[in-house]
Amino acid sequence: MNALYGLGQALLHALDPERAHDLAVKSLELGLYPRQDAPDDPRLAQGLWGLKFRNPLGMAAGFDKDARVWAPLLATGFGFVEVGTLTPKPQKGNPSPRIFRSARDAAIINRLGFNNEGQAAALSRLAARRSGVVGVNIGAGRDSEDRIGDYVSGIATMSAVADYLTINISSPNTPGLRDLQAPEVLDTLLARVRQARASAAKRPPLLVKLAPDIADADLPEIVRVIEAHAVDGIVVSNTTLSRAGVKDARFAAESGGLSGRPLFVRATRMLARVHQLTEGRLPLIGVGGIDGGAAAVAKIEAGASLLQLYTGLVFEGPKLIGEIKRALVVAMTDAKAESLSTLVGRDADQWAERKL
């Protein structure tokens, strides 16, 4: 069976990256995917925000943009799935080609631009959901005249079906979106979205997703604003505009956000710094460059309570899910730990001092 899925992965890599993604989603819809064949080790379970995660490994936003395959993804062994990014209205995103893949660098550059069918379509698909942890990532429309209003609308629309909500202000592919990370603007944004959530019948936890390119000097004030508004968690991080560590010059010349192996150190260093700044008060989701068990363990030790991956799965295939969970179990066994919480942040100081 593993050989069969390995062949399928090779075929996908022979296709244009966006076409390969579309086929992967369709395969999941048709039931053509490997199922988890054994229960997770109970030590992998995480309880956060009143939610029970059977394991800490999630599918990051960007894969299941329109909430089409969250159930199959959970069945493959993920502990949770984050759908989106969803905007209030459908939008096509940026012109193609807009996804580029480098096997040499184990990396992807995308400039998709929040292409999605809109929140109403996802709402109908999630309305009947009864099990599993599914977060909803919300964004602002490219041509919106009131981007903060778009987030308020997203909170009002999607709260009823989301186990948690992620405010995505960190994509580099919607012009000006990252300006919302500026402390004074972020303060206004968070005040309005918290007010919107307070008015909702269901009030899911609220997370903020930050970019990995925030300057060291700017990060403390941004984190202070997030904590001042009693945000429930932070996702660290999104794709980067940096091309540090990329070997394929032609690939590096493409515009857009970079994900995959070259992002790992930058994203993990920032994760550790956020863990230091919050002194462990806020649960963090570590994202960026996880392509094996060692990378996953490093993210936990840098400060993550939960993990997300996407690009690593493109290059390593579905076997990566089991590999990561086994590595986390081994790390707990070696540390004589009964839960992952013992490992969270224990190497944060070292990671925070890493040079880029």
Image (spheres, helix red, strand yellow):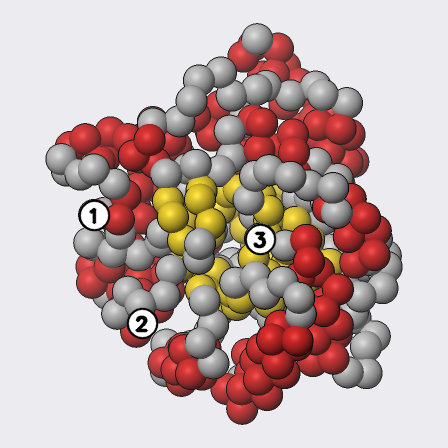
Viewed as shown, does residue 152 lie left or right of 3? right
Q: Please give left or right for residue 23 compared with residue 246 in the image.
A: right
* Residue 130 position (above or below residue 228): above
Placement of 334 over or under 214, stated as above or below: above
Picture coordinates of residue 224 (x, y %)? 39, 82
Residue located beneath label 2 in the image = 278
Looking at the picture, how far across and down is residue 276, in whole percent? 27, 69
Q: Compared to 329, does 214 lie above or below? A: below
Q: Residue at x 66, y 44 (%)?
A: 63
**Residue 347 as seen in the image, left or right of residue 102:** left
| Circle nearer the viewer, 3 or 2 | 3
Q: Which residue is mark 3?
A: 163
Instruction: Find numbered disc 1 in the image and state the secondary structure of the residue it sits on.
Output: helix
Which of disc 2 and disc 3 is earlier in sequence? 3
Q: Which residue is mark 1?
A: 342
Mark 1 residue type:
Thr
Are circles 3 and 1 on residues that touch, CB within 8 Å? Answer: no
In front of the other: 327 or 161: 161
Tell me if mark 2 has few (under 14), some (14-19) or many (20+) residues whose alpha carbon lies within 10 angstroms of its own: some
- Location of residue 327 in the rendering, given as x and y in whole percent from the top left corner: 31, 31
Question: Could you tell me the amino acid type at mark 3?
Answer: Asp
Look at the image and tell me whether residue 174 can be seen: no
